[in-house]
Image: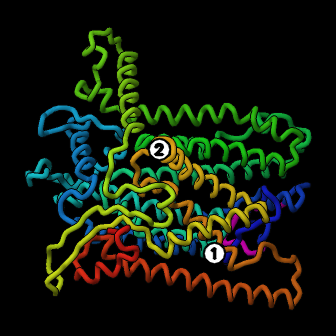
Amino acid sequence: MTLAATSVASPDAGPEEAEAPERDGPTSIAAPARAVPDVIRRRLLPFDARRDPWSWAVTGFVVAVAALVRFIGLGHPPGKIFDETYYAKDAYGLLTKGVEWNYKDNIASYVVHPPLGKWLIAVGEWMFGYQDADGNVRAAGHLWTASPEFGWRFSAAVAGTISVLVMVRVARRMFGSTTLGAAAGLLLALDGFHLVLSRTAILDIFLLLFILAAFGALVADRDARRRRWLTAMENGLDPTRLGRAGRLGIAFPWWRLAAAVLFGCAVSVKWSALFFLPAFLILILWWEYGTRRTVGARHPVRDTFLDEFGWIAMFVAVAFVVYLASWSGWFLTDDGFYRHWLAGNNRPEPPVIGALQNLWHYHKEALAFHEGLDTKHTYQSWPWQWLLLGRPVAFYWSNSGTCGTDSCASEVLLLGTPVLWWSFLPALAALVWLGVARRDWRAGAILLMVFFGLVPWFWFAIDNGRTMFSFYTAPALPFMVLAVVYALGAIMSPATRPATPSPESARRLADRRLIGGVVVGAYLVLVVLCFAYFFKVFVGDVMPYADWSARMWLGSRWI
């Protein structure tokens, strides 16, 4: 098993170039190379993890851990906590009216986020039932009737569990290691921030899932395209005599299409997903250029831009169509907010075009709301506080219940597992250093995703002081975990190894791995223990007030 493969000798090399003899699984290309230099073949040959049963067994274990801590006791705390008071109600409106609905006043609700996340919450309400704030059962479950809280939190728990699955497979593909893939999934599964979002009916866990899945699809697309280039070269293709890639006969990029659909879904949950659009387009161009340069194309820059322009246009167009489709309930009914804004203002409203104009007006009003959001909130925070856990958000608080003492406390606090989160900044610094020193595409890709996930919020904070919260970091979280795992891999294994190691170098390598393994193992144990210590404030368990207070490490900043 490859324990670590976190660096390469060239910017286009994958984990296989440094450690080709110790691949975790079989490859999909077994034919001998035909006039393809070994170094190029190693760079193009993708890591294929699909048929390794051991890796899937490990993946299953990590996902099972994630599912257990997310689903057990999902109906607690009772009632709607934090913004569930909006999204659970909006989801039920979509389920019954096709649009978000205010049942108290019997009118359409004005909302400022797209519908897809609420549609997903509605799936759980359809399956397990919904109950309003007055205790009235609005809908019985179509599968069975569970607690109403379980119904509106079910989809979030599913999304959180699936995101752990995606994380394991993406990390394993990128690092070429089952060990590092499992570590990435376990760190995400045992992060309190991710856990709380997975047990609460708000939108951010869906945004996280779709952004991570879109990134994973692009990583798979990178491997697929390199595999096709290698196959063509093994069949006699000379890249130095090839002009445009269209002559290569490259098959349709289905993984890229999947990434576009997933990105469209992310935007359909929250507009902040648009921050990642430049990152995805840069990755497409960068990885395609790297492939062409690796194979020795005569004009890699020119050919990349000429050949990829159409695919980039397709990426944007598909994402836009998916986004419009998420508004189907609004289009197909007459009850949505601003659905007939033109007609209500005595202006002509032609079919289709009029509906699009009305939707455009809706979006302008929602954008104005977001830009002008400066209302003070007890748990608001600034981007420079987020990775330091400077101001977590309390989703739920109660001082009632039985805990064996006169003073009890129960809280759901959106707090990242401290040992993990306080590792993010050192890991990102290490990623910059190692990425430059080793010219590693993986370091660059992770940093790019973190950059576009966090830096735009600094602009909004400085430019207009917009009210914001720590959960805005959610879509960047998986990539910060990947940064930590990259650093762990660098600790466990050196960048390169000699092809024919001497006994002395082999001994040094074994010592390095032993010491690195102990360090990494100790770190993972600390994360697990820290998660266990804070678990009660992640899920709202009742405890003595003194025990709760002992967990407030940063005092008033966490209260």
Which residue is found at the position 40% from the left and 16% from the top? 353
Instruction: Find residue 484 and report its horizontal and vertical position in percent.
Output: 59, 69
- State the residue position of label 1: 488
- In the displayed structure, would residue 107 be above or below residue 482? above
- Give the main secondary structure, helix, strand or loop, of the magenta stretch: loop
Give, as a single range, the part of the protein colored magenta. Answer: 21-32
Image quarter hosting the C terminus: bottom left
Q: Which mark is residue 272?
A: 2
Q: Indicate the amino acid at tag 1.
A: Leu
Which residue is found at the position 70% from the left and 74% from the top? 490
Which of these two is toward me, 193 or 251?
193
Instruction: Find residue 147 and report its horizontal and vertical position in percent.
Output: 17, 62
Image quarter hosting the N terminus: bottom right
Which of these two is toward me, 426 or 361?
426
Q: Secondary structure at mark 1?
A: helix
For the residue carrying disc 2, how many other residues have a C-alpha within 10 Å: few (<14), some (14-19), or many (20+)?
Answer: some
Q: Indicate the amino acid at tag 2.
A: Ser
